[in-house]
């Protein structure tokens, strides 16, 4: 078994860039250059559109008894050959006459730059999107570029000519050049790895290599052994939080799990075999040690060190000295060494560590961060540590991360970190349950044959709805509905309110459900059950032209003055673009959103005026269906009420506008309707139901000439009827009845009318207590509800499903 080398310590921290540092590489210098004395220099690229060349210099420690020099890095060149964000840099080795490097950026160009004076040696133009990845095929004097346009390209380094375009990717493409055998490896948002010849011919595709976007690639050097001859091993890093190892024939060798967020970079050590480095959105760089299995030749490994940063770590590179360099969202470049004599003084190292921990503690206190608990100091060390007034720090308590704040005389407990997500189980999906991540996927034994059937369930789901879907899918008699609902509640620990009326057991059913005995649970009184069953699911609006909404948001943003507080900064624009790509993805529900992306979507865009709010609300309404919408609750501290207020403000402006604002009205109503889908969102809607229903009670909405507006409003009212089931919502129910009556008396569209009619029926048959039903019936009689029903309402035919539902309501009102 390989032994772990000594730990890395902070050796240098430099800040020249004014914005996030997105890329870094190491470039060997030309020994004949008079302007450069060192054997290598560091090159970094930033969102401030600059490229900085850092030159190492020896500097004395300065402390007593610390005469050994340490290395500092000074900015020798600050280059501005790009006009926008710089996303990638890479060294050029193929020309021995001049030391140079490549850079690529948002301006859709790659360039080759002379290291000594920063002059542009060659430009590589042709991509239709930002250039985000670079690799050199030095044996053939070729440059490979990857772009957001979904392609990789092969270029002649000397002439700048594009020799071949490598298609078949999706969105951002990462590239890697393998020297032996000479190959090109690519990965992209389509999750596949592709192997190409150096002339651009596709040799092999490894589909679904990851579960999310492939962000970076590198070649791992493995120590040779007598039983395992050396072979090329490719490492891939992904948004699925994993690094994976592959043979070039597509054989998976192993996967490495340890990060709590997207893995943006993977870099194999050229000096230490079996070692690689990773950079992640969880604000850490990890050092990994790989071990091989003599049995199945698989690779295993572990993270032997975690280097905590104050923000996202975008890239990591290895220096010829064995040190490593990381570039970070906070605009800083950091060099780490294993040589304690060349490390920064302990006080400076502790300062950086405290700043990083405080940044993560602040984020964790708001539920935004994934924490590496193992890297935290144990709570037993608390007594020996002091802080500044108000400083927050995390400590490890068993398997939990807990935030404490320094109050001058000691640490005061704030609470447990809630940012870490519980492990989910993926379900492939069927006609009744969507594909995606679930909190539980039960294997339920049904029937005498003992067949096991999957029952997926999210903690935000309605157990009754899940049980009903399961019954329909498996052809189980509805008499088992209560038994299955009870099974879900019992095995998930969810609570429920029973009806006052008892329910009969389903023991007579021919289908059996294991584990657990049948339980009794009342949903609504069977004595008043309708032929048209009360609504059990809410209406949602998931389809839309989100490409159009995305373009409109960017168009509106450009209309704000440059110094306007509503105008997005360059970094915020990047976060928005990243979020919009996920929203447009076919696997939207599986996408993970960063806290910075949530900030832009729900804080910055919330400040926009109603005149520019339509595309924003369109994006909000699809986000309301996403499992991560709960992050909005944590940010606002009011369970998401602020976003509802914004929607109601835009809705009011649309209703009072002298012009037709139906598109804005429609998007706001769809957002409110979708908020009724997830339990966490539904809670805030119920708490403020009176205000929301009053805001909808406008003729500009309920009697709009736009059918889609009226249909969406009816859907929102129907969703309230579902949410009110078995809940003490007396006043809100009465308000809902009046609104339904107002719509039904004038509505001519049969689909809209039926939606309101079923909402009315659901409201009447699902109160928690029989006496409340009496109150509702009295209210219906007081407002002449029968007059809005056929046959008295002669505008609506008393036949078919409408006739059946209307008859059920009339029977209840007798």
Image (cartoon, rainbow, N blue to C red):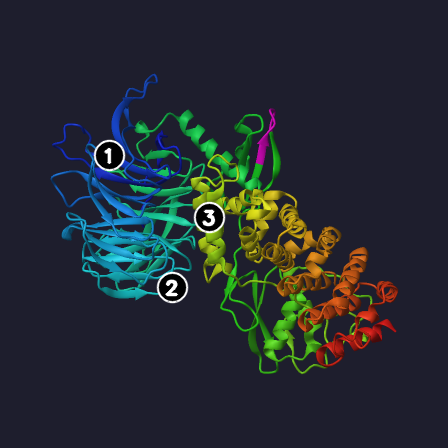
- Which residue is the site of mark 3? 554
- Which residue is the site of mark 2? 208
- Segment colored magenta: 404-410
Q: Residues within 10 Å of mark 3 (few under 14, many from 20)?
A: some
**Horizontal and vertical percent for residue 690?**
75, 52
Q: Earlier in the sequence, mark 1 or mark 3?
A: 1
**Horizontal and vertical percent for residue 649?**
65, 47
Q: Earlier in the sequence, mark 2 or mark 1?
A: 1
Judge whether 237 appears above or below 52 on screen.
below
- Which residue is the site of mark 1? 41
Q: Nearer the viewer, mark 1 or mark 3?
A: 3
Taking the image as shown, residue 544 lies to the left or right of residue 786, namely left
Cα distance between the residues tagged 2 and 3: 32 Å
Assign the C terminus to one quadrant of the image.
Answer: bottom right
Q: Earlier in the sequence, mark 2 or mark 3?
A: 2
**Horizontal and vertical percent for residue 228?**
24, 59
Q: Secondary structure at mark 1?
A: strand
Residue 154 found in image quarter = bottom left
Q: Please tell me which residue is depicted at 15% across the width and 46% down the height of the picture.
A: 94
**Horizontal and vertical percent for residue 2?**
31, 48
Marks 1 & 3, CB-CB < 8 Å contact: no
Q: Nearer the viewer, residue 373 or 589?
A: 589
Cα distance between the residues tagged 1 and 3: 38 Å
């Amino acid at each position: 078994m390989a032994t772990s080398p000594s730990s890395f310590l902070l050796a240098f921290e430099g800040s020249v860039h004014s914005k996030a540092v997105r890329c870094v590489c190491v470039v060997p210098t030309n020994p004949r250059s008079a302007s450069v004395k060192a054997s290598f220099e560091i090159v970094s690229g930033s969102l401030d559109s600059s490229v900085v060349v850092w030159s190492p210099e020896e500097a004395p420690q300065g402390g007593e008894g610390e005469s050994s020099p340490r290395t500092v890095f000074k900015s020798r060149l600050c280059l501005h050959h790009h006009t926008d964000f710089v996303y990638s840099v890479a060294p050029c080795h193929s020309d021995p006459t001049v030391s140079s490097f490549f850079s690529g950026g948002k301006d859709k160009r790659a360039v080759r730059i002379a290291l000594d004076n920063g002059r542009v040696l060659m430009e590589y133009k042709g991509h239709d999107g930002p250039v985000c990845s670079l690799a050199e095929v030095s044996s053939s004097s070729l440059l490979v570029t990857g772009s957001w346009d979904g392609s990789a390209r092969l270029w002649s380094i000397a002439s700048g000519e594009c020799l071949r375009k490598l298609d078949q990717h999706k969105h951002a493409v990462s590239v890697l050049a393998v020297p032996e055998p000479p190959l090109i490896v690519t990965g992209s948002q389509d999750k596949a790895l592709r192997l190409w010849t150096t002339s651009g011919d596709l040799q092999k595709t490894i589909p679904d290599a990851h579960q999310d976007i492939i962000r970076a690639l590198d070649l791992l050097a493995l120590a040779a052994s007598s039983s395992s001859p050396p072979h090329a091993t490719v490492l891939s890093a992904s948004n699925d939080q994993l690094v994976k190892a592959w043979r070039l024939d597509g054989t998976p060798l192993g996967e490495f799990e340890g990060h709590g967020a997207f893995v943006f970079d993977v870099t194999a050590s050229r000096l230490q075999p079996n070692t690689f480095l990773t950079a992640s959105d969880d604000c850490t760089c990890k050092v990994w040690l790989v071990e091989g299995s003599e049995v199945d030749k698989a690779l295993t490994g572990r993270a032997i060190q975690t280097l905590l940063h104050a923000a996202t770590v975008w890239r990591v590179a290895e220096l010829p000295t064995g040190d490593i360099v990381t570039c970070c969202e906070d605009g800083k470049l950091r060099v780490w060494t294993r040589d304690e004599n060349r490390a920064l003084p302990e006080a400076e190292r502790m300062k950086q560590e405290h700043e990083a921990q405080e940044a993560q503690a602040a984020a964790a206190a708001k539920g935004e961060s994934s924490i590496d608990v193992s890297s935290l100091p144990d709570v037993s060390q608390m007594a020996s540590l002091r802080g500044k007034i108000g400083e927050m720090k995390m400590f490890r308590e068993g398997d939990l991360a807990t935030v404490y704040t320094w109050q001058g005389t000691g640490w005061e407990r704030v609470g447990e970190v809630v940012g870490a997500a519980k492990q989910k189980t993926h379900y492939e999906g069927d006609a009744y349950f969507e594909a995606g991540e679930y909190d539980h996927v039960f294997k339920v034994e049904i029937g005498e044959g003992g067949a096991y059937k999957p029952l997926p369930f999210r903690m935000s789901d309605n157990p009754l709805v899940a049980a009903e879907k399961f019954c329909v899918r498996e052809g189980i008699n509805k008499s088992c509905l209560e038994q299955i609902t009870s099974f879900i509640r019992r095995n998930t620990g969810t609570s429920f309110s029973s009806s006052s009326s008892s329910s009969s057991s389903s023991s007579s059913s021919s289908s059996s459900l294991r584990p657990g005995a049948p339980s009794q649970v009342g949903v609504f009184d069977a004595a008043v059950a309708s032929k048209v069953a009360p609504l059990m699911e809410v209406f949602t609006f998931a389809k839309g032209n989100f490409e159009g909404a995305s373009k409109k948001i960017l168009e509106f943003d450009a209309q704000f003055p440059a110094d306007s507080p509503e105008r997005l900064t360059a970094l915020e624009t990047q976060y928005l673009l990243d979020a919009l790509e996920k929203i447009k993805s076919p696997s939207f529900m599986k996408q993970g959103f960063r806290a910075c992306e949530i900030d832009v979507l729900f804080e910055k865009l919330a400040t926009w005026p109603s005149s520019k709010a339509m595309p924003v609300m369109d994006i909000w309404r699809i986000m309301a269906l996403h499992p991560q919408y709960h992050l909005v609750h944590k940010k606002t501290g009011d369970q998401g009420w602020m976003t509802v207020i914004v929607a109601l403000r835009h809705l009011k402006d649309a209703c009072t506008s002298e012009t037709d604002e139906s598109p804005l009205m429609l998007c706001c109503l769809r957002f409110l309707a979708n908020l009724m889908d997830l339990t966490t969102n539904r809670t805030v809607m119920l708490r403020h139901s009176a205000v929301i229903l009053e805001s909808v009670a406008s003729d500009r909405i309920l009697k709009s000439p736009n059918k889609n507006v009226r249909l969406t409003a009816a859907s929102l009212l129907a969703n309230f009827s579902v949410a009110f089931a078995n809940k003490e919502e007396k006043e809100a129910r009465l308000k809902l009845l009046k609104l339904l009556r107002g719509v039904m008396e004038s509505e001519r569209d049969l689909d809209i009318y039926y939606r309101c009619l079923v909402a009315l029926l659901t409201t009447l048959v699902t109160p928690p207590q029989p006496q409340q039903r009496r109150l509702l019936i009295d209210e219906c009689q007081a407002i002449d509800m029968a007059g809005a029903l056929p046959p008295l309402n002669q505008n609506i035919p008393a036949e078919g499903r409408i006739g059946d539902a209307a008859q059920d309501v009339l029977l209840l009102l007798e």
